[in-house]
Image (cartoon, grey):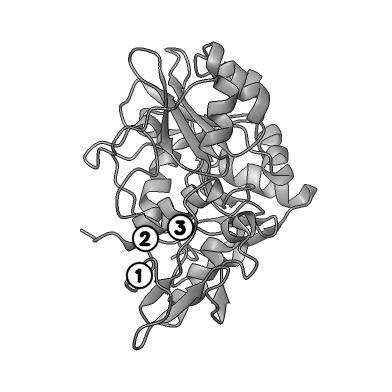
Amino acid sequence: MVTTLILKADDRGIKAACDLLAEGACVALPTETVYGLAADATNGKAVAGIYAAKGRPAFNPLIVHLPDAESVLGIAEMGPQARLLAARFWPGALTMVLPLRADAGIASLVTAGLPTIGVRVPAHPVARRLLRAFGRPLAAPSANPSGRISPTSAAHVADPDTGLGGRIAAVLDGGDCPVGVGSTIIGWSDDGRPALLRHGGIPAEDIETLLGTTLLRPESDQTAPSSPGQLSSHYAPRVALRLNADRAGPCETLIGFGPVAAPLSLSERGDLAEAAARLFDILHRADALGLPIAVAPVPDHGLGAAINDRLRRAAAPRG
């Protein structure tokens, strides 16, 4: 066990975070989606610390965060569609899985041996300040024990029971995450067609409109995921979770949405953006009660597709 520091998101806190990262430590940082567990993506030992802290399978690749699209070009190759997506959605909640440059200098553990790399330019001002100050790419999956509920506040990360408190060096506290679900992940097939690898903070429909084509939707390969977030059981609370519930069963905690009223609600107004931002925080609160969880139906369009993707994975059988 180590003492996990909580760093303020000021100049002193940013410098302290950079110093720890330069030493090969893991530091949680805020993004607009969820908190990420960051380590120097060029340092294999530091990246191994992410896997150790999270208990993450070594075959599950990591997303690399950079301050701008120009920096991305230093480690990955971007085709015309990728450049179009970058111009529209970066900085923001979009990850693209791109061909890895031979001279990228990225630790092989980041890509799990794949010839591609997931890259993102986050929009959160604290994350951007840290990335610019550190000056090297940061590998940063969600800052939670592997398979558990993603964190949307520094308190979620620092919790020693359900988070990473005592396992990582520090948390850079940037407040609550405004989007609340992970980034949308886009890749390309061998014949160059764009594919939706994970629903997330940017609706797939917006991407399809920009590209003028329908995204492929390949099935997840649980043995060797091609991008992060594709394991079928993921984002899971410690207790059982039941979907599409209009009422709580015996000894269940009900999470409501819209017309399904409950003490815990993703959005009483039925607002999908509010529900996405609140999803993981509400799951954390329900999980803490120790009872099985039932979740009301959520429309499966726009951000609702990302919400339902996370809920289905949270409810999946666990190996």
Dividing the image into 4 quarters, which one contains the C terminus?
bottom left
Judge depth for marks 1 and 3 and give the one in front. Answer: 1
Crowd around label 3: few <14 · some 14–19 · many ≥20 (10 Å): many
Q: Which residue is mark 2?
A: 314
Spatial distance from mark 2 to mark 3, Cα to Cα? 14 Å
Residue sitting at x 40%, y 72%: 245
Q: Where is residue 236, by image quadrant?
A: bottom left
Look at the numbered disc 2 and give the secondary structure of its residue: helix
Dividing the image into 4 quarters, which one contains the N terminus?
bottom left
Q: Which residue is mark 1?
A: 241
- The answer to whether residue 189 is left or right of residue 169 is left
Look at the numbered disc 3 and give the secondary structure of its residue: loop
- The answer to whether residue 275 is left or right of residue 43 is right
Give coordinates of residue 301: x percent, y percent.
Answer: 51, 47
Callout 2 touching callout 1 (CB < 8 Å): yes
| Residue situated furthest front in the rendering | 259
Spatial distance from mark 2 to mark 1, Cα to Cα? 7 Å
Callout 1 touching callout 3 (CB < 8 Å): no
**Mark found first going from the N terminus, 1 or 3:** 3
Residue sitting at x 59%, y 39%: 93
Q: Which residue is mark 3?
A: 144
